[in-house]
Image: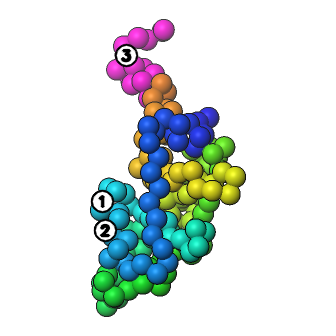
Amino acid sequence: MTTVRKLIEEKAEIKIYSVPSTATVFDALQVMYEGNTGAVLVTEDEKIVGIFTERDYARDGEVKGRTAKDTIISDVMTKQMVLIKPETTLEECAELMGKYHVRHLPVIEKERVVGIVSIRRLAEGLLQENKGTILKLESYILGTGYGE
């Protein structure tokens, strides 16, 4: 079983994006845009106090009458994060995402964030992990390599 550690190690550069809890939603969206990421961690005195995602913005932003430039990130961030360790398996990540309806899991090691597993990265990892099984099934269905 593949663990989160493997996902982290496979990535050439791990960039963790964050904004202070006093930032505006617009500031967070700007960081997300520049980093091409769907989530930023929210910090207070270098401590992680929440996460802000595209989904948070969609649910608690403009549709509720809030403007990005006038809304403080701490008012709309998710405070109850689901945290994982590098030893967490991809299957466990999938279960956690489903159970808690989240798409980003911060990875904590020695009390610091060492990465974030997004639902996209998880799907890529699970697909890679199961590629051999998929190829065997495909071969069986198509009748190629039968008996190998």
- Depth check, mark 3 against mark 1: the one in front is 1
Give, as a three-letter code, the residue at label 1: Glu
Against 148, residue 28 (above or below) is: below
What secondary structure is marked by label 2? helix
| Structural distance between the alpha carbons of marks 2 and 3 | 51 Å
Question: Can the viewer see residue 89?
Answer: yes
Q: Which residues are magenta?
A: 134-148
Pointer 1 residue:
34
| Crowd tier of the residue under label 1, counting other residues whose Cα lies within 10 Å: few below 14, some 14–19, many 20 or above | few
Give, as a three-letter code, the residue at label 2: Gln
Q: Quadrant of residue 73?
A: bottom left
Against 148, residue 64 (above or below) is: below
Q: Position of residue 124 (x, y in %)?
A: 42, 41
| Structural distance between the alpha carbons of marks 3 and 1 | 48 Å
Of 63 and 44, the residue lying toward us: 44
Pointer 2 residue:
30
Q: How many marks?
A: 3
Q: Mark 2 or mark 3: name the one nearer the start of the chain.
A: 2
Dominant SS in magenta: helix
Against 114, residue 81 (above or below) is: below
Of 117 and 123, the residue lying toward us: 117
Q: Position of residue 29 (x, y in %)?
A: 33, 70
| Structural distance between the alpha carbons of marks 2 and 1 | 6 Å
Pointer 3 residue:
143
Please name the residue shown 66% across and 51% down the image. 109
Q: Quadrant of residue 37?
A: bottom left
Question: In this image, 46 relative to 15: left or right?
Answer: right
